[in-house]
Image (cartoon, rainbow, N blue to C red):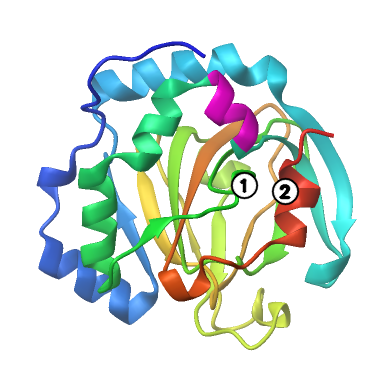
């Protein structure tokens, strides 16, 4: 694992916490434009390019999520913990965890399961998609390292307080585009969400940081193991 210096990756001081928390409480989603500083995103992009060779290609239908499609390449949390001090340090950054906890309205903690706590998703082939799902833990922070233009797919689509994945594509669905360096927070255990299919010739690379509460910490995820295990 490569060593890293003191982290100063996140531009958290640009966000008025009360406004962000209110938006998240209302929408169960909040955009964080420019979350990673310009010099930080260049450093992160270089790190992820180094790790790219470790990604495993996944193409299957997730049975436990209504057979929604998975067509993407992934690096799971165990590999990242061993291979990237930078990403592991970003995930555990106390200022970041404190900020997300303040937005959520309760103290959050790292996910105990090493497979799913921090992962990288690569959409890089025509039609790549992360199909409809709910997460097992309540908060997901997504950070964009590569992002296609809005017309090329790779959009987050979500429905808050959804009873089932069938709500996706319906009148309550929302879709959002993000730029490189952006992040967003999602109430991911009660929000049905997916990433729309990617057009040919584009790439979408995003980190997903999952956080949980003490009451949910022991939850183990079969779907995460299928998508992010080393085999």
Residue 119: percent from left, percent from top: 58, 40
Of callouts 1 and 2, which one flags the residue occurring earlier in the amino acid sequence? 2
Residue 132's disc is none
The residue labelled by disc 2 is 129
**Height in image: 41 above or below 213?**
above
**Height in image: 141 above or below 161?**
above
Is residue 185 or residue 154 the one in the foreground? 185
Residue lying furthest bottom? 163
Q: Please, what is the dominant secondary structure of the magenta stretch? A: helix
> What residue is drawn where x is 39% and y is 40%?
91
Image side of residue 24 versus residue 224, left or right: left
Is residue 47 or residue 112 the one in the foreground? 112
Residue 103: percent from left, percent from top: 25, 66
**Height in image: 171 above or below 83?**
below
Mark 1 vs 2: CB contact within 8 A:
yes
> What residue is drawn where x is 22% and y is 55%?
99
Mark 1 nearby-residue class (10 Å; few <14, some 14–19, many ≥20): many
Image side of residue 71 versus residue 224, left or right: right
The residue labelled by disc 1 is 153
Mark 2 nearby-residue class (10 Å; few <14, some 14–19, many ≥20): many
| Image quarter of residue 171 | bottom right
| Image quarter of residue 64 | bottom right
Q: Secondary structure at mark 1?
A: loop
> What residue is drawn where x is 70% and y is 30%?
124
Residue 113: percent from left, percent from top: 60, 51
Whole-number angstrom distance, CA of label 1 to CA of label 2? 9 Å
Q: Is residue 82 magenta?
A: yes
Q: Is residue 38 magenta?
A: no
**Height in image: 207 above or below 124?**
below
Residue 35: percent from left, percent from top: 28, 41
Magenta region: which residues? 78-83
């Amino acid at each position: 694992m490569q060593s890293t210096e003191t982290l100063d990756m996140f531009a958290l001081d640009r966000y008025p916490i009360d406004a962000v928390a209110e938006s998240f409480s209302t929408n169960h989603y909040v955009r964080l434009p420019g979350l990673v500083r310009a010099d930080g995103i260049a450093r992160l992009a270089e790190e992820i390019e180094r790790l790219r060779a470790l990604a495993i290609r996944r193409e299957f239908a997730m049975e436990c999520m209504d057979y929604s499609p998975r067509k993407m390449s992934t690096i799971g949390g165990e590999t990242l913990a061993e291979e990237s001090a930078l990403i592991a340090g970003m995930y555990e950054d106390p200022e970041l965890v404190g900020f997300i906890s303040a937005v959520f309205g309760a103290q959050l903690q790292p996910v105990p399961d090493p497979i799913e706590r921090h992962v990288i998703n690569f959409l890089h082939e025509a039609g790549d998609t992360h199909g409809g799902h709910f997460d097992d833990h309540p908060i997901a922070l997504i950070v964009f390292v590569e992002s296609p233009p809005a017309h090329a797919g790779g959009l987050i689509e979500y429905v808050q307080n959804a009873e089932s994945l069938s709500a996706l594509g319906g009148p309550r669905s929302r879709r959002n585009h993000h730029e490189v360096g952006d992040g967003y927070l999602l109430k991911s255990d009660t929000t049905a969400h997916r990433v729309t299919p990617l057009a040919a010739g584009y790439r979408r690379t995003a980190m997903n940081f999952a956080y949980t509460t003490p009451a949910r910490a022991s939850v183990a995820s079969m779907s995460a193991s299928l998508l992010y295990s080393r085999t």
